[in-house]
Amino acid sequence: MSILIKPIITEKATADSELNNRFSFVVNNKANKIEIKNAVESAYGVSVTKVRTMNVRPDRKSRYTKTGVITGKTSAYKKAYVQVAEGETIDLYSNL
């Protein structure tokens, strides 16, 4: 079971990492905070002080077309905010 799926690289997440030393990841839905902490520490070689998680709900959309109503939804996922110890950082752009 892979715990870390991918880092979240948006303007808001990048600003949060520069100001507060807090990084965002998309993680496995069944992973808990202890597993996320151990996965980040082993993958990036930093010490994690705090982990906050949230389940992101799917967005449902419907569109009216000539052939009728088309409905769809995005998939749900789990997001983790990881606070890294003072003075340490994670370089997310090194392997892009």
Image (tube, rainbow, N blue to C red):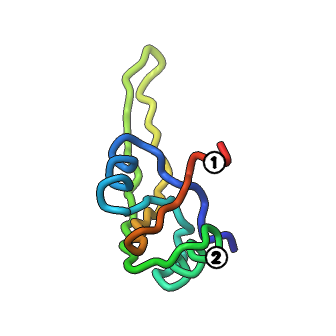
Determine the residue positioned at 41% across, 68% down. Answer: 87
Determine the residue positioned at 46% across, 64% down. Answer: 78
The residue that mark 2 highlights is 42
Q: Position of residue 71 (x, y in %)?
A: 44, 36
Residue 28, by quadrant, is bottom right
Q: Earlier in the sequence, mark 1 or mark 2?
A: 2
Nearest the eye: 1 or 16: 16
Image quadrant holding the C terminus, namely top right
Determine the residue positioned at 46% across, 81% down. Answer: 33
Determine the residue positioned at 48% across, 18% down. Answer: 67
The residue that mark 1 highlights is 94
Other-residue count near label 1 (Cα within 10 Å), few / some / many at <14 / 14–19 / ≥20: few
Give the left or right position of residue 5, taking residue 85 as reference: right
Residue 47 position (above or below residue 26): below
* In front: label 1 or label 2: 1
Q: Do the residues under discs 1 and 2 have CB atoms within 8 angstroms? A: no
Is disc 2 placed on a helix, strand or loop? Answer: helix
Give the left or right position of residue 13, taking residue 46 as reference: left
Residue 16 position (above or below residue 44): above
Residue 65, by quadrant, is top left
Tell me the kind of residue under disc 2: Ser
